[in-house]
């Protein structure tokens, strides 16, 4: 068996800048190639994306995380592997500027069909080169993980494995419109960052975008902002995959990695859910060794012991950012006790039994501060909650439509909130969910009791003050409550400011006015469905 922490071989490093990578329409993309300085061939890690290959990590790093990384180097690049480390472990690294970005000519359309066709061709070209042994992997964070899901679904013959590290699958649900509500702040930030490095003033194929708008019968809020960037067919993915989620990445980098893991057709697939910021875990020695162990197994044919281990590894979160790793066999966990906690507006509480009498609580959606209603349950014994959560709420709004923004809070025995490490800002709450009432219609084929799945294909706007059922997907979480701790359900219409930059404040999309009322008790079974995990 190959030990995953075997010392690197002193290969040396050869760098080739701006090599030409031909694609099917005759265009030549530009790439940097990092090679071991000894005779090969070797397996290759390839990436293609909108962050120009020649901009160093430190110069792209807007949040100042580079000095905090465990590894540094002359060729470090935002959210991709460090070639100096990987070359020493017997891999080539191919870093390609996507069409219309950096040194590559053409018109960019990030994650679109053209980019996937280019990436397909680049993978097959790389596999045919003398430096390559024919085994290609796609490895990277965020955009490069999003790209990995999509190119794996296209099945280039020489793609051998992917590591999708904190990367969206469903652009609409995971990133652009949480529960149908436009998440504009992150998109605006990324547009300002990438546009100066694109070859056209506006990214995208204007003819394809115009055609999509002209032929669509959907209102604008149901059109994908990334027109022409289709969701990957997860069932078409066959290569071994390692999907890596972040408990703190609720705005973008949690849901997709779990859904991608569950939906992928791969026989050999693994899921890791960790804590920490969005970038650093990838570059830790522990993170690199996990990546290397996976790639050594599937690209080099070395027995690293993966076949004998459970496919899921997750960080069980504690207070103050601490955690313990635990291996599991399935998601959600088979031993989950699905526990409903029914809301009682009279008491502001939740409990295992539905309140006998009907009551309600309301808030003003139009206030500048975050108005909300809350319900809490106190735990009398140590209780673990790990998995997806669903809120079933009966709601009415004076204006008919309303945005529900749900926050779960973990309070200790002194009613002080326990916060958790976020992927971007330092701390966030215990859990989050979103739903615009007019988007409440469910896809009956994909919805599960613990994971509502909304269609987002037509609007179903309630009448003013009409009581309707809203089933809200609350993203998976991991919480451990000690005796005397409480779980608080908070329902409002304004963002938790800790969610920056994944917030929803576009004035053309958000029209929150009037009172919103949550109905409980009697015929209204408003409740949280919570995954309680019994001790082993």
Image (cartoon, helix red, strand yellow):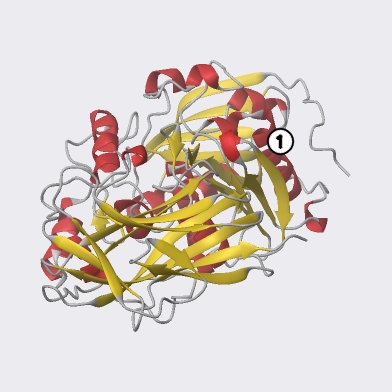
Is 1 above or below relative to 40?
below
Residue 377, can we see it?
yes
Is 484 above or below relative to 269?
above
Furthest residue toward right: 1
Residue 481 is situated, as x and y percent measured from the top left of the image, at 60, 51
Total labels: the figure holds: 1
Residue 75 is situated, as x and y percent measured from the top left of the image, at 52, 20
Residue 522 is situated, as x and y percent measured from the top left of the image, at 35, 82
Residue 373 is situated, as x and y percent measured from the top left of the image, at 30, 57
Q: Quadrant of the C terminus?
A: bottom right
* Residue at the image position 42 percent from the left and 34 percent from the top: 424
Q: Quadrant of the N terminus?
A: top right
Is 97 above or below relative to 252?
above
Choose top left, top right, bottom left or bottom right for residue 240: bottom right
* Residue at the image position 32 percent from the left and 46 percent from the top: 110
* Residue on which the image places disc 1: 289
Residue 228, can we see it?
no
In this view of the protein, which residue sits in the foreground, 230 or 432? 432
Mark 1: few/some/many CA within 10 Å (<14, 14-19, 20+): some
Left or right: residue 309 compared with residue 409: right
* Residue at the image position 41 percent from the left and 33 percent from the top: 425
Left or right: residue 455 compared with residue 192: right
Choose top left, top right, bottom left or bottom right for residue 291: top right
Furthest residue toward bottom: 523
């Amino acid at each position: 068996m190959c030990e995953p922490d075997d010392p690197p071989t002193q290969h040396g490093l050869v760098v080739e800048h701006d090599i030409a990578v031909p694609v099917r329409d005759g265009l030549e993309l530009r790439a940097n190639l990092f090679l071991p300085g000894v005779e090969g061939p070797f397996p290759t890690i390839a990436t293609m994306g909108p962050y120009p290959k020649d901009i160093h990590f430190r110069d792209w790093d807007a949040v100042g995380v580079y000095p905090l990384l465990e590894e540094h180097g002359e060729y470090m690049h935002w959210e991709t592997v460090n070639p100096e480390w990987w070359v020493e472990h017997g891999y080539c690294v191919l870093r390609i500027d996507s069409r219309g970005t950096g040194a590559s000519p053409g018109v960019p359309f990030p994650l679109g069909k053209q980019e996937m066709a280019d990436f397909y061709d680049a993978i097959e070209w790389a596999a045919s080169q003398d430096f390559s042994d024919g085994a290609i992997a796609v490895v990277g964070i965020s955009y490069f993980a999003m790209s990995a899901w999509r190119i794996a679904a296209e099945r280039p013959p020489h793609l051998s494995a992917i590591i999708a590290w904190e990367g969206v699958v469903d652009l609409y649900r995971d990133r652009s419109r949480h529960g149908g509500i436009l998440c504009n702040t992150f998109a605006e930030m990324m547009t300002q960052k990438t546009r100066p490095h694109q070859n056209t003033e506006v990214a995208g194929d204007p003819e394809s975008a115009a055609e999509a708008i002209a032929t669509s019968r959907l209102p604008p809020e149901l059109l994908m902002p990334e027109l022409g960037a289709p969701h990957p067919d997860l069932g078409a993915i066959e290569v071994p995959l390692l999907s890596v989620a972040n408990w703190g990445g609720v705005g973008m980098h949690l849901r997709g990695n779990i859904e991608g893991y569950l939906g992928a057709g791969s026989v050999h697939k693994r899921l890791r859910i960790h804590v920490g910021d969005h970038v650093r875990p990838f570059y830790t020695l522990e993170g690199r060794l996990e990546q290397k162990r996976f790639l050594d197994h599937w690209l080099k044919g070395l027995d690293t012991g993966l076949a004998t281990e459970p496919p899921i590894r997750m960080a069980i979160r504690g207070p103050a950012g601490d955690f313990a790793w635990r291996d599991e066999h399935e998601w959600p966990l088979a031993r989950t006790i699905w526990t409903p906690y029914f809301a009682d507006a009279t008491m502001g509480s939740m409990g295992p039994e539905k309140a006998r009498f009907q009551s309600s609580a309301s808030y003003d959606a139009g206030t500048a501060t975050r108005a909300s209603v809350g319900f809490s349950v106190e735990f009398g014994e140590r209780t673990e909650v790990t998995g997806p959560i669903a809120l079933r709420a009966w709601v009415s709004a004076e204006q008919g439509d309303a945005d529900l923004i749900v926050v779960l809070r973990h309070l200790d025995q002194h009613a002080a909130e326990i916060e958790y490490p976020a992927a971007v800002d330092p701390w966030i709450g215990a859990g989050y969910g979103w739903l615009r009432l007019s988007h409440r219609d469910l896809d009956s084929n994909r919805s599960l009791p613990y994971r509502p799945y909304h269609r987002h294909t037509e609007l179903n706007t309630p009448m003013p003050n009409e009581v309707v059922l809203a089933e809200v997907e609350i993203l998976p979480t991991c919480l451990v409550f000690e005796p005397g701790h409480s779980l608080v359900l908070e329902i409002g219409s304004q963002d938790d400011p800790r969610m920056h930059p994944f917030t929803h404040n576009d004035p053309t999309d958000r029209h929150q006015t009037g009172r919103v009322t949550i109905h409980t008790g009697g015929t209204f079974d408003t409740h949280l469905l919570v995954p309680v995990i019994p001790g082993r």
